[in-house]
Amino acid sequence: MIPTITKNYQNVVISTGNIINNELGQRKSNEELYDGLKVTLQKEPNAERVVVEIDKLHGCVQRDTEELTKRLTENGRNEISIGAKIFVNSNSTENIQQAVEALLNILKVTHVDNVVLAYHPNANAITPTAAVASATSGATTTKSPCSEGNTGTSSVSNWSIRNGQQGVDELKELYKCLEQYAHNQKITQLGIADLDAEALQELHKTASVAPTIAQVNLATCCVVPAELQEFCTAHDIQLNTHGDPELILQEEQFAGLVPGYTIDWSLRYQVHVRCRGVLTAKGYIVGASKPSET
């Protein structure tokens, strides 16, 4: 870890920069994040032509900021689409605010086109040993229930059961925080990940800015439930699939890279050229903190 950050800051923000041109951006999300952080936080920032900038004032470590800026400005803002997905596993509107502000500040834009929220307060995670092996070797450690003949209840159909009414209420508060950015025209579209039809319906009926994107993870659900499909069709919600784990990075993995800190939130952003659909930039931003000294 870069010493000036760990010595001086209770909270830090770490940006991997654009990862699509260095073989990091063609893998599973947990592998991309782990390796992106590892490259960014290496002890010799100039090794392998990696450029790292340290913002000592705000406790921010950024990699390849000039190259990222180039990708964001080589086309007009109306010619590119910027989307992001925020991963949180604890109920904190402050974390949502920090994530959105970091996204806008690091990309140096006034708005993004869409933000998807993934909230899993009772996240399922692969074992630490398997996760470390996966992120360091690139080996796949989880299998689709389709390939295993698993006919049990899929995660897309039991978010409400796993997280209960408390989880739904917490999700509404986190989503409400994103709605404020939508009202202020800093986010154009809002989305949600991994909800079953019941939870999505409840969120939808109380939202002031209705979600227009819903994501389901087909790694744990072979067929999207008909009730969810019907609700999305009836309310003009774009239904997409994804392969992100509920817990995008194990605590043990992050502690190995940034001792004494824990992840509060993480996000992935992607920048596409609209007319060609070309992915021109992709990266991760992580917010982390360490316990207050008493």
Image (tube, rainbow, N blue to C red):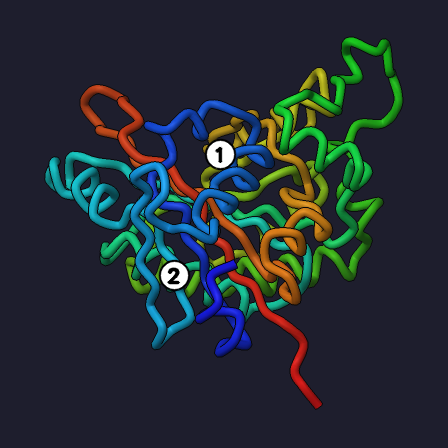
Task: Give left or right: position of 49 versus 101.
Answer: left
The answer to whether residue 86 is visible is yes
**Distance from Cα at disc 2 to Cα at disc 1:** 27 Å
Q: Which residue is pictured at 14% across the width and 43% down the height?
A: 73
| Residue for badge 2 | 102
Q: Which residue is pictured at 79% across the width and 27% down the height?
A: 154
- Under tag 1, what secondary structure? loop
Residue 74, quarter of picture: top left
Between 264 and 22, the one nearer to me in the picture: 22
Q: Position of residue 89 (x, y in %)?
A: 67, 55
Q: Which dot, 2 or 1, sits closer to the camera?
A: 2
Q: Residues within 10 Å of mark 1 (few under 14, many from 20)?
A: some
Q: Which mark is residue 237?
A: 1
- Quadrant location of the C terminus in the rendered image: bottom right
Q: How many marks?
A: 2
Residue 275, quarter of picture: top left
Type of amino acid under label 1:
Ile
Q: Which residue is pictured at 87% across the width and 16% down the height?
A: 151
Q: Position of residue 288 (x, y in %)?
A: 56, 63
Type of amino acid under label 2:
Ala
The answer to whether residue 200 is visible is no
Which residue of the protein is positioned furthest toward the bottom in this rendering? 294
Relative to residue 115, is residue 24 depicted above or below?
above
Residue 110, quarter of picture: bottom left
